[in-house]
Amino acid sequence: MKARMGHHIAVVALAAALGLAGSNARAADALPSWNNGPAKQSIAAFVERVTAQGTADFVPVAERIAVFDNDGTLWAEQPMYFQLLFALDRVKALAPQHPEWKTQEPFASLLKGDVKAALEGGEPAIMKIVMATHAGMTSDDFDQIVRDWIASAKHPKTGHLYTEMVYQPMLELLAYLRANDFKTFIVSGGGIDFMRPWTEKVYGIPPEQVVGSSGKSSFEMRDGTPVLMRLPEVNFIDDKAGKPVGIHQHIGRRPIAAFGNSDGDLQMLQWTCGAPGRRFCLYVHHTDADREWIYDRNSSIGRLDKGLDEAEAKNWTVVDMKADWARVFAFEP
Amino acid sequence: MKARMGHHIAVVALAAALGLAGSNARAADALPSWNNGPAKQSIAAFVERVTAQGTADFVPVAERIAVFDNDGTLWAEQPMYFQLLFALDRVKALAPQHPEWKTQEPFASLLKGDVKAALEGGEPAIMKIVMATHAGMTSDDFDQIVRDWIASAKHPKTGHLYTEMVYQPMLELLAYLRANDFKTFIVSGGGIDFMRPWTEKVYGIPPEQVVGSSGKSSFEMRDGTPVLMRLPEVNFIDDKAGKPVGIHQHIGRRPIAAFGNSDGDLQMLQWTCGAPGRRFCLYVHHTDADREWIYDRNSSIGRLDKGLDEAEAKNWTVVDMKADWARVFAFEP
């Protein structure tokens, strides 16, 4: 009886907590790392409208789908995509098994420490690096490789774990949306299997709510044990016009809110906000050279050019990181 | 205050309802259309074990993933896959716009009512029918076409709506698993976009938990409005060795329970039960010529041959439909 009472109290407390969400004052409480400006206000206004029962803007819980880009939107992406840093570490780790890499580009340059020269080969060079480091093992083995790396590798500038390089205001936003019965998804150009081992712990987003780029794989029996072998072949690139396709493929519903930071997210925002009913589209604009990085129209990583123009034309919310975020990373003093 | 009290009472009632699930007696209550035999007992025993906290078999809620085939497992598949019947209806509806079909196979035979002759062309013929009826429109248009058909088309033998041709014991099983905090997914060889418009209402399975075969699609702007165009090109076949691949791609976790009825589900069951920890694999065996259909090793639809042997060898649960199900369809007298 005591245990059951405790259960009741916990459930009632949970219900009360959920009941708290939904008014402007409560958004302020739920988003403490957001300065009280137009970005925060637009988020709160949207959430209040779609959760207000009996109004024209009300959206049933099942349709409260929110999609988030990852690189540059939930965690940082400078000085280069973290998954590329993972791949470079893997090239070094695998080099002893690949003596031929000493004379083969882009591996030769990488192993000499000249990342810039290695990447001069452009997309084909990057593909070679990705395939050499992301294929040729089972899904379980790759999962473990990612877990080991993400638990130990440090960011070259800050010295922090990569999972600490996540934006505190965005963590609060994810939690705020979920408290208002949104289902939160990642829709990233990054590798789906590179994200899944840690997104649940870091973002509260389970593997089945992660959409990303992927390679092909094949089901095989090895000594009577079933495995999925990762093949060196592209299956799907979840970027640009691929993002709405990936959303449709994985989620099968049109989101009502989308969050990105680059032109690679533009079609996802167009798809989300280009439908009837109340919708919300937001760009994170990297404007803070001190606490993070400053880049937009001319950056090779996370370029935000067409998207910035379209955000202005369509009245989407643009987060000015420097002005709108009271704190960027949780580790800040 | 009154409203809040009502809310509390509802939440407490919900908690009590959830608290009910999980013991043998309760499984009996939750599965009234299952006769009390070894199949029902094996289901209840599995659910009790993986939900028993503090035991070696306990599985955390997040990992309680259950996957279900659709055709022949959740709804019937005779005299042919219902999606094929949908495609045949679409061919008839579209025929006026395609005068050339009068002389082109497989369309010519179909339009004369000779389905058997049309399907003599095998897989290439079926592909032609599928592409002619499932591609060339937007995702929204296809969604509406499916909704209209599923709301009105009748099964050729029973005269019932196709959504009434679902197995009552399996509906109870889905609900029983969800009451024990399982997340239920469909993993079907059928078309993902053919299932999603109705699975939530019929099975309680939302679009984002449906995995299936798919065609490619492309994101396009039409007069400033974004659309996804369905292309006449295969993207993924979610059958046989494709099922574990589809599971990995969409769910990103290994299921702990899998339910199928044919050799097309064998790899899904192998993948689910071929891992450490307590697992559950079940085959529905079509043994009831009176209430449903009787077929297995020699059927061209839903053949269950290798799977039946492997189920015996690996001690998987095999449902004898005739003996184990007190009721097959809800519409039975």
Image (cartoon, coloured by chain):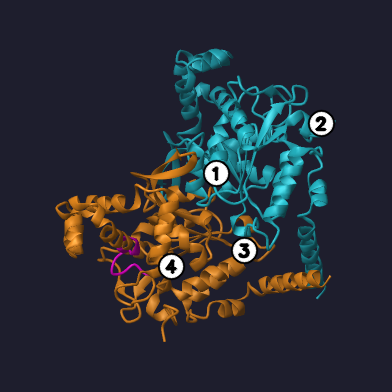
Chain colours: A orange, B cyan
Query: Looking at the image, do the residues carrying marks 4 and 2 touch, with CB atoms under 8 Å apart?
Result: no
N-terminal of the two: label 3 or label 4? 4
Does mark 1 fall on the same chain as mark 4? no
Q: Amino acid at mark 2?
A: Glu
Callout 2: few (<14), some (14-19), or many (20+) C-alpha neighbours within 10 Å?
Answer: few
| Segment tinted magenta in the rendering | A74-85
Residue B25 seen in the figure: yes
**Residue B190, position in %: x, y?**
55, 34
Vertical position of residue B217 compared to residue B125: above or below: below
Q: Quadrant of residue A30?
A: bottom right
Q: Nearer the viewer, mark 4 or mark 1?
A: 1
**Residue bearing the label numbered 1:** B274
Front position in the image: B49 or B189: B49
Vertical position of residue A198 compared to residue B114: above or below: below
Residues under labels 3 and 4: Cα distance? 20 Å
Residues under labels 2 and 3: Cα distance? 38 Å
Callout 1: few (<14), some (14-19), or many (20+) C-alpha neighbours within 10 Å?
Answer: some
Does mark 3 fall on the same chain as mark 2? no
Query: Looking at the image, do the residues carrying marks 4 and 1 touch, with CB atoms under 8 Å apart?
Result: no
> Residue placed at 71% from the left, 40% from the top?
B170
Q: Mostly what secondary structure, the magenta segment? A: loop
What number is the disc on residue A181?
Answer: 3
Q: Nearer the viewer, mark 3 or mark 4?
A: 4
